[in-house]
């Protein structure tokens, strides 16, 4: 988070004071650092040096067009999970040859759209999806390249809501079934099997389970190759954790080095390594800027009521996630309190029972590490327009998404004539 620091005018992002942005754009507003995005991407890219590889950005972590454009310009690929993300990725200028499409429930429209754009491959998550893809491809006179998403049945040791690689999960195909399925793909006319994919979860901070899963999936790659299949891609997924509080997350280099011999062995026979990171690239590149509206006491508890709530940043309510809260003017001491939003839910909080900046009404706060799964999970709940987004690059900054207007709230709604 070195791109957010205290200096002239209080808390700054690169060469711009956050207070200046708040003055001009209002709050709540997401602020992203271009330098932080670039640094995280390059760290990942360098961690794989010596291996034929591609770093994709998981678009669901932060789908803003300008953020995507920046990542595409660094050379990143895109990991998408819906037709909407395909649309965004194409608008942002990603090379379709660097786009991989995952997700357990791709519809015919989404499959056809992906084939239409000639994306690199689909990460297929079930036998039914594979059959469906074959039928769609045949019907539309297209062909599709696929990678099988295996479920290595490993517990990543992260939050249950963001674990995806255990036996009971809806994601992926068990390794033995994947073998049987791979045999069948040979009979399909329009679908070509070119890869193996895994993704065991998000905010991974322990290398053990992740390394175990890569070994297991790599075993499948070797087995398929030994059966004569040309496995061109091995996608090890994303999920590298970041430091929100005091987590000891591995560095990208540690993450790759933990499995490097395996990746090298696979790479030696011509297979390219793909990774698809969201949180690691965008998480610490963003902060949510909010203003304290009221201070309030209720019994023994103290509250700071801010103009940002769970509809703007859902992670604390959804995962009990911790986000550091900083005062923008750096003057405030600390006091035990909750930072809550205006939404009519008890679960609407950004920080709970914590030493928080002892901010006055009207003061600005920055909720840190909000660049991933922040705006992309925002909603209009309580009919709250979604926040503005700003991208900072050096001493320049630009609104990259306008704050929603009231008219946006009812866009597409129709009052029928029979009322
Ligand atoms: C969400 C997701 C990712 C990215 O996860 P992060 O924890 O943000 O790195 C990668 N691959 C797939 C298939 C995903 O669903």
Image: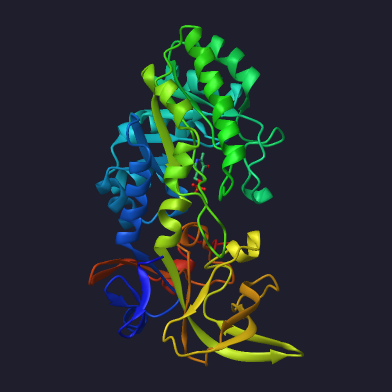
- Specify the quadrant of the image occupied by residue 305: bottom right
Q: Position of residue 290 (x, y in %)?
A: 47, 78
Q: Residue at x 62, y 29 (%)?
A: 152
Q: Is residue 31 above or below residue 266?
A: below
Q: Is residue 320 above or below residue 356?
A: above
Front position in the image: 402 or 165: 165
Quadrant of the rendering where the C terminus is positioned:
bottom right
Front position in the image: 78 or 51: 51
Q: Position of residue 109 (x, y in %)?
A: 46, 34
Q: Residue furthest right?
A: 299
Front position in the image: 157 or 372: 157
Say whether residue 216 is left or right of residue 68.
Answer: right
Residue 80 appears in the figure: no
Residue 28 appears in the figure: yes
Q: Residue at x 42, y 48 (%)?
A: 59
Q: Is residue 44 above or below residue 406?
A: above
Q: Residue at x 43, y 71 (%)?
A: 407
Quadrant of the rendering where the N terminus is positioned:
bottom left
Q: Position of residue 147 (x, y in %)?
A: 47, 25
- Specify the quadrant of the image occupied by residue 84: top left
Q: Residue at x 65, y 50 (%)?
A: 161
Name the image colouring. Answer: rainbow
Q: Position of residue 51 (x, y in %)?
A: 35, 30
């Amino acid at each position: 988070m070195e791109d957010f620091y205290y200096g002239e005018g209080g808390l700054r992002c690169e060469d711009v004071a956050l207070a200046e942005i708040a003055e001009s754009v209002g709050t709540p507003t997401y602020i992203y650092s271009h330098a932080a995005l670039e640094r995280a991407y390059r760290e990942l890219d360098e961690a794989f040096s010596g291996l034929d590889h591609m770093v994709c950005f998981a678009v669901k972590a932060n789908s803003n067009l300008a953020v995507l454009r920046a990542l595409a310009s660094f050379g990143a690929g895109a990991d998408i999970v819906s037709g909407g993300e395909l649309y965004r990725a194409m608008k942002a200028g990603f090379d379709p040859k660097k786009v991989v499409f995952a997700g357990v429930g791709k519809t015919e429209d989404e499959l056809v759209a992906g084939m239409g754009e000639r994306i690199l491959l689909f990460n297929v998550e079930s036998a039914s999806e594979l059959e469906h893809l074959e039928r769609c491809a045949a019907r539309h006179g297209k062909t599709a390249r696929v990678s099988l998403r295996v479920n290595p049945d490993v517990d990543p040791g992260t939050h249950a809501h963001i674990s995806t690689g255990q036996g009971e999960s809806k994601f992926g195909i068990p390794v033995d079934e994947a073998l049987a399925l791979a045999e069948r793909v040979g009979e399909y006319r329009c679908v070509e099997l070119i890869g193996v994919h895994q993704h065991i979860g998000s905010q991974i901070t322990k290398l053990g389970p992740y390394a175990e899963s890569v070994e297991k999936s790599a075993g499948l790659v070797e087995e398929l190759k030994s059966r004569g299949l040309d496995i061109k891609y091995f996608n090890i997924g994303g999920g590298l954790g970041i430091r929100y509080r005091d987590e000891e997350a591995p560095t990208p280099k540690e993450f790759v080095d933990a499995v490097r011999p395996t990746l090298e062995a696979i790479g030696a026979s011509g297979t390219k390594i793909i990774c698809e990171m969201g949180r690691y690239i965008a998480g610490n590149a963003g902060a949510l800027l909010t203003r304290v509206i009221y201070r309030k006491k209720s019994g023994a508890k103290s509250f700071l009521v801010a103009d940002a709530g769970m509809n703007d940043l859902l992670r604390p309510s959804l995962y009990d996630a911790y986000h550091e809260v900083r005062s923008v003017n750096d003057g405030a001491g600390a006091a035990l309190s909750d930072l809550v939003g205006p939404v009519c839910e008890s679960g609407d909080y950004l920080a709970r029972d914590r030493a928080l900046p002892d901010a006055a009404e009207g003061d600005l706060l920055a909720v840190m590490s909000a660049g991933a799964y922040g705006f992309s999970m925002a909603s209009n709940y309580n009919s709250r327009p979604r926040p503005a987004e700003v991208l900072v690059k050096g001493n320049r900054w630009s609104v990259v998404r306008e704050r929603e207007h009231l008219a946006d709230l009812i866009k597409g709604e129709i009052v029928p004539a029979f009322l």
